[in-house]
Image (cartoon, rainbow, N blue to C red):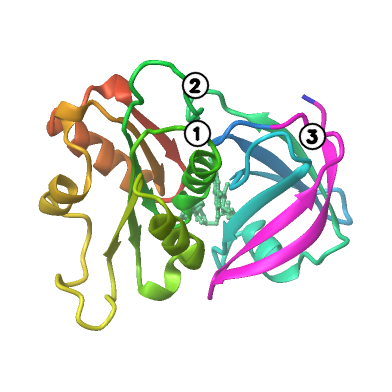
Amino acid sequence: MDWEVGTVIETSTQTPTARSLTLDVPSWPGNIAGQHIDLRLTAEDGYTAVRSYSLASSGPDSRLELAVDKLPTGEVSPYLVDVALPGDQLELRGPLGGWFVWRPEEPGSVQPVAVQLIAGGSGIVPLMAMIRSHAVSASLAPFRLLYSVRTPDDVFYAEELARLEKESDLLAVTYVYTRRTPPGWPVPAGRITDSALESAAFPATDAPAVFVCGPTGFVENLATRLVALGHDPADVKTERFGGA
Ligand SMILES: Cc1cc2nc3c(=O)[nH]c(=O)nc-3n(C[C@H](O)[C@H](O)[C@H](O)COP(=O)(O)OP(=O)(O)OC[C@H]3O[C@@H](n4cnc5c(N)ncnc54)[C@H](O)[C@@H]3O)c2cc1C
């Protein structure tokens, strides 16, 4: 697949350590919700670094949206979060990945399959593409998002998620705060417990399509527990962003 050039046309702060970037890629063939791109940065001395980034956008539009969390010691993410400006050009190739994707069902097709989304941190990005794709489709699939973040300040797309949840009976969002909760939150900060998983996620008996995305350790932990709760491993799709 050839490298293409995208122009940054807009950036927006998501959290104190993350921002979204909208890129215009005139040659973009379109993408399905859940897919990602490879992005290549080249230094003046010719050194290159390639990293994968999920798309928060989908469909035929030539405008792509990324949302990147900064790893302070990283090579690429600090540039995307702190440095890149509208007008800058970035090399990318894609769309990539045909497994971790959600498509609205055909109109009039069989009963829609419930969709369980589970995100850790920036793992929300491809799931956001699915939520947005669902919101503009005629799909009657019920969606639930279980979203684990460190603190209330670390939620990506907080306002948009609140609005979409309010506008649709088909979307339910549950937050789990691992380090600091909002005031008055009914449970202490901590990782996703079995009881949170059982109360906020579709049960295995509903046979939902499950998408889990986030840091590698988070994804492996959740996928193992979902299978232990009776979910068919074939229904649990995962995307690992790397790290511990
Ligand atoms: C398919 C796919 C999609 C991705 N989509 C996104 C996305 O939408 N948004 C996003 O912010 N990131 C995403 N990532 C992660 C991204 O590709 C980079 O790994 C991340 O931005 C760090 O790159 P870096 O060059 O800044 O850090 P590096 O220089 O690669 O790494 C710096 C240090 O951080 C560790 N590290 C690397 N990645 C992670 C991580 N994810 N969590 C914790 N520690 C890590 C490394 O082991 C190293 O010690 C995705 C990864 C994959 C595989």
Residue closer to the observer: 244 or 166: 166
Q: Residue at x 88, y 61 (%)?
A: 87
> Which range of residues does the magenta coloring cover?
2-30
Mark 3 secondary-structure assignment = loop
The residue that disc 1 covers is 138
Q: Residue at x 51, y 27 (%)?
A: 103
Q: Is residue 26 magenta?
A: yes
Q: Residue at x 81, y 59 (%)?
A: 9
Image quadrant assignment for residue 240: top left
Identity, as a three-letter code, of the amino acid under mark 2: Pro
Outermost residue, bottom side: 183
Q: Position of residue 168 (x, y in %)?
A: 40, 50
Proximity of marks 3 and 1: CB atoms separated by less than 8 Å: no
Q: Within 10 Å of the Cα at label 2, are there few (<14), some (14-19), or many (20+) other Cα atoms?
A: few
Q: Main secondary structure of the magenta part?
A: strand
Q: Residue 218 vs residue 98: left or right?
A: left
Q: Residue 86 vs residue 93: left or right?
A: right
Mark 1 secondary-structure assignment = loop
Identity, as a three-letter code, of the amino acid under mark 3: Trp
Identity, as a three-letter code, of the amino acid under mark 1: Ala
The residue that disc 3 covers is 28
The residue that disc 2 covers is 107
Establish if 142 lies above or below 11: above
Residue closer to the observer: 137 or 9: 137
Q: Is residue 61 magenta?
A: no
Image quadrant assignment for residue 153: bottom left
Q: CA distance from mark 3 to mark 2?
A: 26 Å
Q: CA distance from mark 3 to mark 1?
A: 25 Å
